[in-house]
Image (cartoon, grey):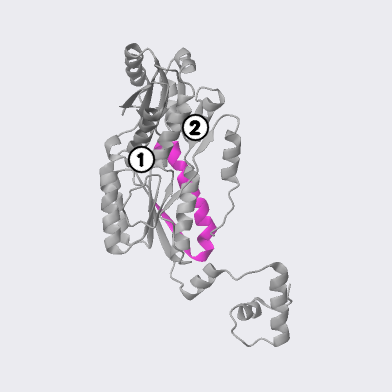
Amino acid sequence: QAGVSAGTVDRVLHDRGNVAPEVRERVLQVMKELGYEPNIMARSLANNRKPLRIAVILPDYSNDPYWAQPKEGVERAAEAVRHYGVAVDFYFFPMFDPAAFLETVKNVLDIRPDAILFAPLFLHESEYLIEASSRLGIPKVMINTNIEGSDALCYIGQDSYQSGVLAGRLLNFGLNDGDHAMLLNLDKEVLNARHLMDKERGFKDFFNRVEHKSVTIHAESFEDFDNSAALHVWLGDFFAKYPRLKGFFVTNSRAYKLAAALDPVTLKKVKIVGFDLIEPNLTLLNDNNIRFLINQNAWHQGYLGILAIVNNLILKKEMPRNQYLPLDVVVRENAEYYLRRTLELPMTVL
């Protein structure tokens, strides 16, 4: 638009001289008309051509649809920052195998990436990652699960305790005095999963504070959740023992597995609160078999995790230690909005 070469514009931007005064003024005028501002990130990278390599350690998404969402968020962010010299490498581990997670961590540390983004599903093994990466001077960002007291750049995700409180509040709407409710962990290694324990604590604390209504809470775990028949029998024993069991809070994205294990009549009678906008949960939400879903913004966790690393290591910005994402309450009437919001998230690094 200024009628000059890209090289001339480059010399004006970086004040390198060898540009006639009238040409310089013309370029500056066009910059003003276009509202152009120099890209600090690109300028920083121009002075340091070494690529920034980010290692992303996530559970194998082929075994759980939830983990496809942060993976996709990371991929979208990687595309947004690729031309700035940032490269992202994925390292997947079997979801329920702490030893495999630890082996993956050791392999990543051996290659010395510039930064690590990871989901600390296993508390003890994640503490090893935190200590070893600190010793090697490798910054890291946590998503999904927060380990307090670490030197991570930041945590991006929900406040797990408050999400448990919210789940209690939502489930409470459908319960009467004297009813029973179950907090159900359809997961393995629950005692080694900090986020699940925090959700349980928040859920119980909510009901302990409820006035003028008494609801009995059962906190249970069922590890063989892929066996629908076994889960059906196990639940049947609870219904027989507690005929006023009227509500369930499933602490992760597997509310659909609970629904599949219930007979159609029981499914219509109980109230279910779950997490995450994955297809099987959304189908049940639309059919009114799940009353509420709490959106953990898994896609945004991966996306913003990469941007946090780029903003800190390239733009030298200080990151807030805890970047809590909103506790979105999703019902069938607004589910489409939250799905569309994810797809329309702008590709930005600032």
Residue farthest toward the front in the current orientation of the protein: 212
**Residue 112, horizontal then vertical, whole percent:** 32, 62
Q: Quadrant of the N terminus?
A: bottom right
* Amino acid residing under circle 2: Leu
Query: In the image, is residue 81 above or below residue 264?
Result: below
- From where the camera sits, is residue 189 visible? no
Q: Quadrant of residue 35?
A: bottom right
Rendered image: mark on residue 106: none
At x 61% / y 87%, what residue is drawn?
17
- Residue denoted by label 1: 195
- Which span is picked out in magenta? 63-90
Please state if 233 lies on the left or on the right of 271 as rendered.
left
Alpha carbon separation for disc pair 1 and 2: 17 Å
Nearest the viewer among 179 and 318 is 179
Crowd rating for badge 1 (residues with CA inside 10 Å; few <14, some 14–19, many 20+)? many
Label located before the other in sequence (1 or 2): 1
Q: Position of residue 323 (x, y in %)?
A: 45, 51
| Residue 313, image x, y percentages | 43, 65
Which of the pair 347/323 is nearer the observer? 323
**165 relative position to 230: left or right:** right
> Which quadrant of the figure has residue 195?
top left
Q: Of helix, strand and loop, which mostly describes the magenta segment?
A: helix
Q: Is residue 173 left or right of residue 112?
A: right
Is residue 82 inside the magenta stretch?
Answer: yes
User: What's the amino acid at mark 1?
Assistant: His
Q: Regarding mark 2 in the picture, which secondary structure is present there?
A: strand
Residue placed most toward the observer, 33 or 180? 180
The residue lying toward the viewer, choosing from 260 and 26, is: 26
- Asked if the magenta segment contains residue 336, the reply would be no
Q: Quadrant of the C terminus?
A: bottom right
Toward which corner of the image does residue 194 lie, by quadrant?
A: top left
